[in-house]
Amino acid sequence: MSIITIAGTATASAKGKHKEPISITTALAVFSIEGDETNYHSSWTTIEKETLVPAGQISAPEWPLLDGLFLSAVQSSHEQFDAPIPFGSVTKGKSKDQFYMSPTVGFTALGPVLGAPVVIGEYQLKLSSSELCQIKGEGKWKFKAKNSGIDGKGDISVCTNFVPAAGTFIAVVTVTGSAAQVD
């Protein structure tokens, strides 16, 4: 599960200039993993597609376009664990792909159904672990105005742990940087 929190003021030009600070925190849960391949001799795991679903709405009163949206993500990763999943921690690795912010979310027997995304962004993470995070990610994110109502970029950090009560990994995601709402 990832947590993203957003705060800032949203004044922007049509070209996405005059960017303002943005800080987002929210939560995501790992919903599905496809193409999971582990080399047990080296402890490297490659995941072709990992789907993360929202655990709640984004609260961003300073950013009306984002306030109340749901964050989701689809990523691929290559990680080395120090023990079998889900109990091991990542010693090194990387993940990347896209995240989406949508106004609605629902669930069917086949999985989550998200409304049309208002924001589509990309991110890349270097992975390790820490005392508090089985999987700690640090990296960069960006929104492109052509793919969303916001133009921006900045830093992203992720703290992910297996939560036995939920039966899955939960990630807390923090996004900081600068952005502008596109008119």
Image (cartoon, rainbow, N blue to C red):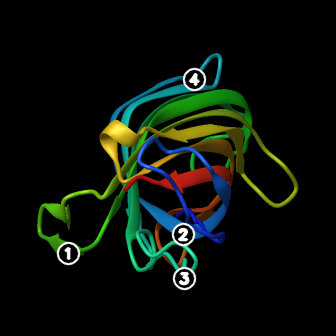
| Helix, strand or loop for disc 1 | strand
Q: Is residue 96 above or below residue 138?
A: above
Image coords of residue 66 (percent x, y): 44, 69
Tell me which label, 2 or 1, sits earlier in the chain. Answer: 2
On residue 61, the disc is 3
Kindly identify the amino acid type of the residue bearing the numbered disc 2: Ala
Marks 3/2: CA–CA distance: 18 Å
Residue 119 visible to the viewer: yes
> Residue under circle 1?
106
Image coords of residue 88 (percent x, y): 69, 46
Q: Is residue 57 left or right of residue 20?
A: left
Tell me which label, 1 or 3, sits earlier in the chain. Answer: 3
**Residue drawn at point x = 70 percent, y = 35 percent:** 127
Kindly identify the amino acid type of the residue bearing the numbered disc 1: Gly
> Residue under circle 4?
40
Image coords of residue 18 (percent x, y): 62, 50
Tell me the mark number nearer the camera, choosing from 4 and 2. Answer: 2
Residue that sits furthest to the left in the current view:
109
163, 74: nearer the viewer: 74
Binning the other alpha carbons within 10 Å of mark 1 as few (below 14), some (14 to 19) or many (20 upward) gives few
Kindly identify the amino acid type of the residue bearing the numbered disc 3: Pro
